[in-house]
Each structure stands twice: as C-alpha cells, then as structure tokens.
Image (spheres, helix red, strand yellow):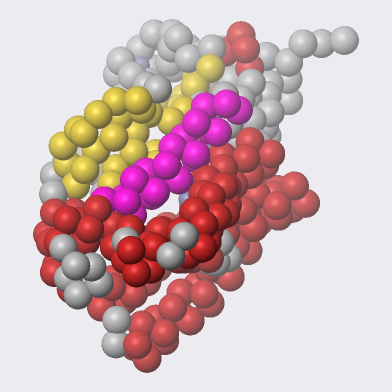
C-alpha cells in the first residue's frame, strides 16, 4: 500500500525521474502550517520551513533513486505525500545492490545534518538569535529535521530504510527469502512499539504512520512466505535466470500471452503447448525479470 500516481500530479522531471505530488499533501500542509504559526514572526517562514521539509525528503528519495540506477536497477518515479516520499525503485536482485540503493537515502541526511549544524552554529556566533531570529530558528529547525528524519528512517522496522538495510545485510548470510522473513518479523515487533508510542503520545500522525508501516510490513512478510514456498519446488538443470542466477522451477506456470494457456516454458523451449506461439522472453518466477530463453541457457563446459 503506497501512494500511486492516481490523485497526484507531476511536478517536474529530473534525471529521467518524474516527481509527483499527491493532492492530500496540500491538506496536511495547510493544517501543519497553521499549527506551527507561533514558531516564526511571519507566515512566510512557516511555509518556507514546511517546504524545506519536503525538499529534504525529496533529496532523500533522489538518493535512493540515483543509487538504484547506479547499480543497474530501475527508478523512474517519486511520489510525495503527507507521510513523506516514496521512491519507486527496483534494484537488481543482489544484496549489495539492494543495500546501496537503500543506504543512499539516509546518507543524504548524514551529509545535510553537519552542513546545517555548522551554519546554525556560525549564525549563533554572529548573534542571529537577536538580529535575525527567524533565519536563526529556521537553521536550527533544519538541523532537527535532518536528525529526526535520519533517526526515524534508520529504525529497524521493515519497510523503513533501517529495516531494509537489515534485510540486505541478512541477505548476504541467509538469502533473499529468509532475510525478508526475519526482517518483517522484527518489523512487526517494531510496529507494536510505534503503536504503543502513538497511543501514549495521543498522536494521530504516528498512528497513521504505524498503520501504513504495518500494511507494508505485512505485504513483505507475505512476499517472504511466497518466496519460501517457491524455494521448495524442484528446479530444472541447464538454465539459470540471467538477472538473479536462480534455476527455473519445474511446472506449467508460464502463461501464454496469445491464448492464455499455461505450459512449462523450459520443457517446451518457450513454445506454448496449446497454440504453439513462441514467447520472445520468459519471466523469472523468483525475481520477475523477463529474459529471452537463450539468455537463460547455461553455457556448457
Ligand atoms: Zn528512505
Ligand atoms: Zn531471476
Ligand atoms: Zn498459447
């Protein structure tokens, strides 16, 4: 469950990545700015602070997207909504590639945090607290904002960045399925903690955020279960997915695009058993990547 392009409009395109803004952002922005109207002497600073929050979130998401591209993955869309931003990334199915495209997001905040800390400290030394209290307050707000985003995102609660980093690290040791199962399991415990905190603080925002994390964590857990089931099915020799390296399962699970009939693509050499049409590419049941049958064939000797 993530925001989609439905109900969103395109803001701009940068480096081939489309940035969308969801309509609900305006509603929550309005409420948030009203609630913080006492922080600055003029409304303009309040609005600037809220916009700066989303520019920071956007830079974080670009960190994910550009890193994902760098390791050969797909990333072409970012959606901003009141709970932050979602970068639609599909990293190649390798733990290292996943780790880098997840870690690059928080790394943006790791870079921004000391920059604003130095600026705010210099401003303090120059006596901005009295001469320019709004600009001074804004700089410290940026320090807390980056520190807050960093701490929250690094919580080991799947699918927050911390949870996904944990998953990538476990992947090196126990593989893609078990690492996802373990990190979503830890994620459920973390969500329980967040819910307790939301009730304790009577925070609607935290409650909504917890619900969102819970839904996505559950989705990851279901995916892990499906991956475990898939791992138990016998595999065919002589073929390996060019993207993830796994051998295809034995069974008629490939659907023909022409007639809708199913056949075992690797037993029939890509030919549909019903209508005899030949598929140009065959999808991998493990990673979803589609490749021509020739690319699947393992070279002998
Ligand atoms: Zn992130
Ligand atoms: Zn694959
Ligand atoms: Zn067919």
- Left or right, residue 86 beside residue 266: left
- Left or right, residue 187 beside residue 248: left
Q: For this rendering, which residue is in front, 194 or 285?
A: 194
Q: Is residue 20 above or below residue 283?
A: below
Looking at the image, which residue is at 39% across and 48% down? 56
Looking at the image, which residue is at 17% across and 56% down? 44
Q: For this rendering, which residue is in front, 59 or 199?
A: 59
In the rendered image, the quadrant that contains the N terminus is bottom left
Report the magenta residues as a range: 51-71
Where in the image, quadrant-wise, is ligand 3 located? top left
Q: Position of residue 282 (x, y in %)?
A: 50, 20
Q: Position of residue 225 (x, y in %)?
A: 54, 57
Characterize the magenta stretch by its predominant secondary structure.
helix
Q: Position of residue 143 (x, y in %)?
A: 47, 61
Q: Is residue 152 above or below residue 273?
A: below
Q: For this rendering, which residue is in front, 104 or 145?
A: 145
- Left or right, residue 6 beside residue 57: left
- In the image, residue 61 lies in the stretch drawn in magenta: yes
């Amino acid at each position: 469950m993530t925001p989609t392009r439905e109900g969103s409009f395109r803001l701009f395109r940068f480096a081939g990545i489309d940035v969308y803004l969801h309509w609900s952002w305006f509603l929550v922005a309005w409420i948030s700015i009203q609630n913080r109207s006492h922080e600055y002497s003029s409304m303009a600073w309040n609005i600037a602070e809220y916009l700066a929050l989303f520019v920071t979130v956007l830079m974080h998401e670009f960190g994910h997207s550009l890193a994902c591209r760098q390791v050969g993955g797909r990333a072409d869309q970012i959606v901003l909504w009141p709970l932050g931003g979602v970068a639609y990334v599909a990293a190649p199915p390798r733990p290292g590639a996943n780790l880098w495209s997840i870690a690059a997001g928080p790394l943006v905040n790791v870079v921004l945090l000391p920059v604003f800390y130095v600026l705010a400290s210099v401003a303090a030394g120059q006596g901005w607290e009295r001469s320019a209290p709004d600009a001074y307050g804004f700089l410290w707000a940026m320090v807390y904002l980056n520190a807050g985003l960093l701490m929250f995102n690094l919580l080991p609660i799947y699918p927050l960045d911390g949870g996904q980093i944990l998953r990538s690290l476990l992947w090196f040791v126990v593989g893609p399925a078990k690492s996802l199962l373990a990190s979503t399991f830890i994620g459920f415990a973390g969500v329980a903690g967040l819910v307790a905190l939301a009730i304790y603080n009577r925070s609607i925002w935290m409650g909504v955020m917890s619900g969102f994390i819970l839904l996505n964590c559950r989705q990851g857990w279901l995916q892990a279960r499906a991956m475990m089931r898939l791992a138990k099915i016998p595999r065919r020799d002589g073929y390996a997915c060019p993207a993830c390296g796994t051998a295809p399962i034995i069974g008629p699970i490939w659907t023909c695009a022409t007639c809708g009939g199913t056949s075992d693509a690797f037993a029939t050499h890509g030919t549909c058993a019903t209508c005899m049409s030949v598929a140009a590419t065959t999808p991998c049941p493990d990673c979803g990547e589609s490749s021509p049958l020739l690319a699947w064939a393992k070279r002998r000797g």
